[in-house]
């Protein structure tokens, strides 16, 4: 008698920790229970993946979905729609909302709001001078992916620019904390270098020294505390070289924007729409980031999805806000890099799922293996698509990659065994659930 499953994904090319090759997937109760040739097995639902490549579900570990308080830019529902349309099955959302996510009540409020989300989710708790001593408790709350600290680029209570403050955060945490690493003191000194209406000066204001100086401080403090850190959106060749010698304490995130756009061309063409923190940098630094991928320094890719309205972005520099959307384009842009031979598909899978599972200690996700959640991203590696503003689900309604034709397209997003997106149509809104973590599980 043949086996029976709730779902079979049949006939696709599977890419997972075991390599790349033909295999079927059998799913029961939202989890993968068989990987291999399922022969004549039956299922309540069968997905024909012939001609498609089946990846573990993409996990975007850095998004800003702006809710609560900034919903005119984005909200949890619209951001999650953009995610699943881009093949993303889970997101980690940042704490710089209004109010900021710095205590148990604020986290609980986000988790209630997140019941509207189409994808699975977790939220960072922001580290501050005020809550530094209790972060070890806050980071272990259900639905929390960890602590996020802004050493630069933020204002108000979320800014922890000083060594003493960072050391207090590190002394409190038990999990790996994520850091925006720019030296606030140097940024303040260099603000007068901003030329009104000239976005090419953004890279001068937030120069490479601001980044490497901060990252060197951060690694020194982490070593002194004996704690693990995650350096977000690394942008300089010097940081990649430095971090390659400090992988025992530091994991590394890169973004598709910094791997794809270069200064000054991006600023001249896109103006405020190319502005983000840390900045888009020149070809020398971009080549360093690609060495970080080739040599294994980079651990994860995050979109740093940070939408602002067109009207906000059109303000003359430096009044224009920093940040650009990216959760919907993360996978298509990186698949295009795969198509052009800049990295292998196996390496991309490591950066978009396996790496997140390792760095953050995700329980039951991030691997296409028996016993794990059936989170799958099905892609057509041969299909081409032109990315367009009007196809973006984000409330901001634009993308810095408008007009870019990519090879490699996500065609289906499956979350816990249920097809949430198929061929650009969202089938099951409001199905997202909190991500679980190994270090927060109780007996």
Image (tube, rainbow, N blue to C red):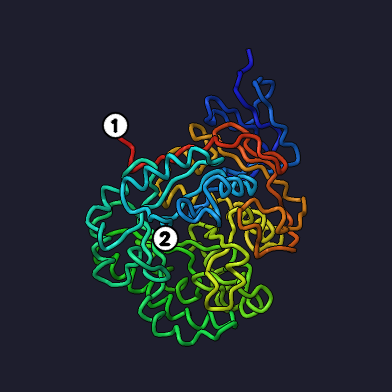
Query: Which disc, if any, is residue 443?
Result: 1
Choose the circle earlier in sequence order: 1 or 2.
Answer: 2
At a point 52% along the width and 78% down the height, the residue shown is: 318
Q: Residue furthest top?
A: 1
SS at badge 1: loop
Mark 1 Cα within 10 Å, few/some/many (few <14, many 20+)? few
At a point 66% along the width and 73% down the height, the residue shown is: 270
SS at badge 2: strand
In the displayed structure, would residue 210 be above or below residue 432?
below
Left or right of 38 on screen, residue 172: left
Question: Which sits in the foreground, 419 or 353?
Answer: 419
Left or right of 282 on screen, residue 106: left
State the CA–CA distance, disc 1 to disc 2: 28 Å
Residue 191 at x, y percent in the picture: 45, 83
Residue assigned mark 2: 251
Residue 367 at x, y percent in the picture: 51, 42
Q: Is residue 306 visible?
A: yes
């Amino acid at each position: 008698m043949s086996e029976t499953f709730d779902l079979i994904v049949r006939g696709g090319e599977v890419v997972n920790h075991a390599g790349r090759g033909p295999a079927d997937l059998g799913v029961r109760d939202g989890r993968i229970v068989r990987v291999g040739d399922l022969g004549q097995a039956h299922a309540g639902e069968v997905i024909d993946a012939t001609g498609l490549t089946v990846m573990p579900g993409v996990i975007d570990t850095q998004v800003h979905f702006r809710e609560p308080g900034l919903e005119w830019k984005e909200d949890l529902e619209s951001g999650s729609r953009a995610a699943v349309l881009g093949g993303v099955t889970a997101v980690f959302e940042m704490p710089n909302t209004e109010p900021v996510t710095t205590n148990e009540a604020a986290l609980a409020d986000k988790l209630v709001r997140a019941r509207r989300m189409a994808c699975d989710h977790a939220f960072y708790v922001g580290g501050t001078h005020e809550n530094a001593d209790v972060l070890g408790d806050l980071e272990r709350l259900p639905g929390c992916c960890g602590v996020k600290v802004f050493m630069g680029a933020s204002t108000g209570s979320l800014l922890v620019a000083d060594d003493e403050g960072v050391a207090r955060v590190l002394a409190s945490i038990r999990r790996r904390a994520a850091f925006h690493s720019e030296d606030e003191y140097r940024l303040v000194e260099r603000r007068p270098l901003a030329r009104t209406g000239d976005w090419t000066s953004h890279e001068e204001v937030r120069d490479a020294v601001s980044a490497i100086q901060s990252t060197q401080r951060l690694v020194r403090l982490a070593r002194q505390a004996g704690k693990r850190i995650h350096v977000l959106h690394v942008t300089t060749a010097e940081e990649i070289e430095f971090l390659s010698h400090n992988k025992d304490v530091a994991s590394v995130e890169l973004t598709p924007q910094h791997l794809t756009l270069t200064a000054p061309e991006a600023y001249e063409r896109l103006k405020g729409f190319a502005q983000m923190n840390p900045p888009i940098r020149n070809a020398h630094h971009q080549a360093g980031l690609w060495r970080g991928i080739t040599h294994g320094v980079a651990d994860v890719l995050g979109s740093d999805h940070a939408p602002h309205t067109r009207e906000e972005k059109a303000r003359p520099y430096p009044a224009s806000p920093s940040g650009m959307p990216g959760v919907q384009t993360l996978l298509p842009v990186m698949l295009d890099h795969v198509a052009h031979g800049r990295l292998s598909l196996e390496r991309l899978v490591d950066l978009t799922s396996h790496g997140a599972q390792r760095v953050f200690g995700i329980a039951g996700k991030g691997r296409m293996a028996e016993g794990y959640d059936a989170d799958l991203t099905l892609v057509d590696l041969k299909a081409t698509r032109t990315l367009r503003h009007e196809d973006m689900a984000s409330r901001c309604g634009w993308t810095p990659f408008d007009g870019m034709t990519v090879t490699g397209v996500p065609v289906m997003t499956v979350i816990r065994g249920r097809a949430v997106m198929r061929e650009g149509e969202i089938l099951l809104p409001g199905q997202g659930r909190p991500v679980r973590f190994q270090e927060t599980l109780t007996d």
